[in-house]
Image (cartoon, grey):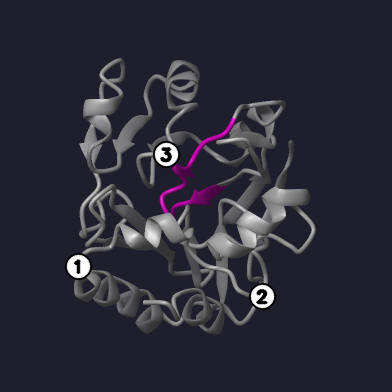
Amino acid sequence: MELRAFGPELWIAEGPVVSFYGFPYPTRMAVIRLSNGDLFIWSPLPFAGLKDEIDALGPVAHLVSPNLLHHIWLGAWKQAYPAARLIASPGLPRRRRDLAFDAVLTDTPDPAWAADIDQVAVHGNIFMTETVFLHRSSRTAIFADLIENFPPGWFKGWRGWLARLDGIVFPNFGAPREMRWGFVDRRKARSGIQRVLDFAPERVVIAHGTMAESGGTGFVRHAFRWL
């Protein structure tokens, strides 16, 4: 693994391919350097040689889980950076009682990063609430699982057929269909996504699949046409 610049004060790293219910999922994390020099680590992945690169950027201050599925490696990062704050997605403290979280994400950005990053909690889903982050200086929206965009051919055989049916394969990409079904209050969800669109992102980082390095607003709009 190695860091790659994705925009001003924003880096990404490609992680291992993991099995998710038998489907091979590529993974991705993001690192944002705040204006005070502190690092905001989004959806941290295994170190795998990253530590020296991370340390060269600045002190790790915030370890952030954007939803209930992106938390596996939080403990290892906290052990490596004990001074960093652990930030949970809603409901995660109940799931990870082994971790002592410092805060839970809301619709309002934490004062520690509010000058650099806005955030939108996309409500309305009965299973989980995902927080989308909006990095101001790079004009980037950062999604975890609300947008998945796999290239044709990534999944083989019957998995490819199911993935296309699930609505996560280019050009018909977006949230997995089972996640869409969980949005029982679509009015709330539309309100959240509209806030992201109002931000007019130029770039979009997603955890799984092909990102948008330009045309970000259209990318988000296309991904949520179902909504």
User: Sequence-wise, which precedes: disc 2 or disc 3?
Assistant: 3
Residue at (74% x, 62% y) in the render = 151
Residue beneath label 3, please?
A: 69
Image quadrant where residue 150 sits: bottom right
The image's mark for residue 210 is none
Question: Residue flagged by tag 2: what amino acid is it?
Answer: Pro
Residue beneath label 2, please?
A: 171
Residue at (19% x, 67% y) in the render = 185
Of circles 3 and 1, the one toward us is 1
Q: Nearer the viewer, residue 165 or 122?
A: 165
Q: Position of residue 157 (x, y in %)?
A: 77, 50
Q: CA distance from mark 3 to mark 1?
A: 21 Å
Q: Is residue 33 magenta?
A: yes
Q: Nearer the viewer, residue 19 or 87?
A: 19
Q: Which residue lies most toward the front here?
A: 158
Looking at the picture, does residue 219 appear above or below residue 17? below
Using a 10 Å C-alpha cutoff, classify the residue at mark 3 as few (fewer than 14 neighbours), some (14 to 19) or many (20 or more).
some
The stretch in magenta equals 30-45
Question: Residue flagged by tag 3: what amino acid is it?
Answer: Leu
Residue beneath label 1, please?
A: 185
